[in-house]
Amino acid sequence: MSNPIRYSQQPVELPLEAWLLDGTPAPGCKVCTALDFQRNQARKRNDWASACAAAREIRNHRRGHGEPS
């Protein structure tokens, strides 16, 4: 039988993979520029979920410009 831990422990913090925040906005695209702004603001407030979501949108939106993701 196992012995469960019966006291509080510090939470485990996993590292954030850098590629999740990658994404280069297409030059001159207003949508890409707005998403880049959102990503930067989210990073400043340590909102990693929003920053990753904005980066994903940038990567996906670039496909609409005929560029590789």
Image (cartoon, helix red, strand yellow):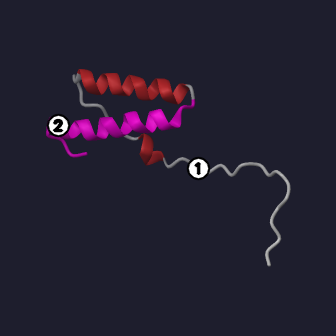
Q: Residues within 10 Å of mark 2 (few under 14, many from 20)?
A: few
- The residue lying furthest to the bottom in this view is 1
Q: Is residue 22 left or right of residue 41?
A: left
Q: Name the residue rendered at 58%, 50% in the picture.
A: 15
User: Residue 5, position in %: x, y?
Assistant: 82, 62
User: Residue 30, position in %: x, y?
Assistant: 25, 20
Towards the viewer: 57 or 25 = 57
Q: Is residue 12 left or right of residue 66?
A: right
Q: Which amino acid does the dot numbered 1 rest on?
A: Pro
- Which of the image's four quarters has the C terminus? top left
Towards the viewer: 6 or 48 = 6
Q: Which residue is mark 2?
A: 64
> What range is drawn magenta here?
46-69
Residue 23 visible to an observer of this rendering:
no
Q: Is residue 52 left or right of residue 1?
A: left
- Which of the image's four quarters has the N terminus? bottom right
Towards the viewer: 12 or 3 = 3
In the structure shown, which secondary structural element does the residue marked by tag 2 occupy?
A: helix
- The residue lying furthest to the front in this view is 1
Q: Name the residue rendered at 43%, 29% in the picture.
A: 39
Q: Which residue is mark 1?
A: 15
User: Residue 12, position in %: x, y?
Assistant: 69, 52
Q: CA distance from mark 1 to mark 2?
A: 31 Å
- The mark that comes first in sequence, 1 or 2, is 1
Q: Which amino acid does the dot numbered 2 rest on?
A: Gly
Quarter of the image holding residue 66?
A: top left
Q: Residues within 10 Å of mark 1 (few under 14, many from 20)?
A: few
Q: Looking at the rendered structure, which numbered label has been put on residue 66?
A: none
Magenta-drawn stretch, dominant element (helix, strand or loop):
helix
Above or below, 8 relative to 64: below
